[in-house]
Image: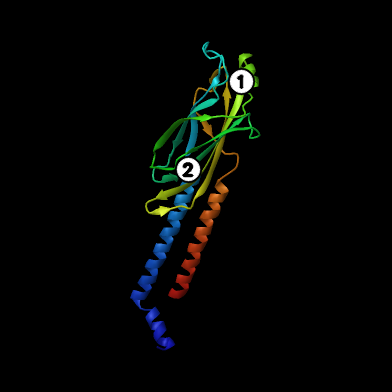
Amino acid sequence: MSWEDDIRAMAHPIFILYKFCCLIIVFIITLLIILITVKTIKESPSCSVKNFYVPALNRLDNANTSSSNNFIFFDLQLKNGLDEISVRYDPINLAFFYGPNTSLSIGNYTLGGFHQGKKKGAQRRDVVETHGVPWDDAVKAVSNGSTVIFRLDLTAKIRFKEWFFMSKKRNLAVWANMEINNSGKKVQKEAIELTSGSSRIGGYLNTMWLSVFVNLFVTCLLLKQCF
């Protein structure tokens, strides 16, 4: 076939329509990538602690005069506020610390991974055994009317799903401090939301723009074939 025949074939209406349809598909995929990424940036899953109880520090209970109870009871809430995107959690790692930083680790716990539907919430109540807590100092502090700080760190890998699109795994890393008084409970009555000290938006945007660049590159190649 000569180059003149090639030009005639490329100018055929059916061939042009085929290329045009390909361009539309690439555009739609690019648009979906942008929409999904923007949605997940705007509202990622929220994690909060509803209850956090340290029995050894409960000085209001006359029957509890010993600090030998080295367990911590926690009530964790996980909420997916996205109305069109579900979330898949890998195993969730919880790290407990005494004090407002991570210098003194006192316990670890792992929650099983699960799938969370659109606009759904999940609650996980459990107990963790601690080690290395300076109970004498902590009991003395709350007995004198002061408070002590426990820190909870949560890490997990998550993926977002909309229709048949599944995002790559992303790191979820959040934490919060729990101020405990002489009741053994946190001072703040409302649930404490775990937050991240670092921005996750940058990584999400990088993923989005990389996907957009690849799709635009494919679009340019198709345009080159059409004209």
Q: Viewer-proximal residue, 50 or 206?
A: 50
Examine the rendering and report whether any part of residue 66 can be seen. Answer: yes
Q: Position of residue 11 (x, y in %)?
A: 38, 79
Task: Let me know if residue 227 appears in the view.
Answer: no
Q: Which residue is mark 2?
A: 91
Q: Residue 48, position in %: x, y?
A: 49, 32
Dot 1: what SS?
A: loop
User: Which residue occupies the extreme left position in the image?
Assistant: 14
Q: Quadrant of the N terminus?
A: bottom left
Please tell me which residue is depicted at 58% across the width and 44% down the height of the picture: 199
Which of the two residues, 43 or 139, is positioned nearer the viewer here? 139
Whichever of callouts 2 and 1 sits on the residue coming sooner in the sequence is 2
Q: Residue at x 45, y 50 (%)?
A: 36
Q: Evaluate if marks 2 and 1 touch, with contact meaning CB atoms under 8 Å apart.
A: no
Q: Residues within 10 Å of mark 2 (few under 14, many from 20)?
A: some
Q: Position of residue 37 (x, y in %)?
A: 48, 50
Q: Amino acid at mark 1?
A: Thr
Location of residue 225 with respect to 168 vertically, above or below: below
Q: Which residue is mark 1?
A: 147
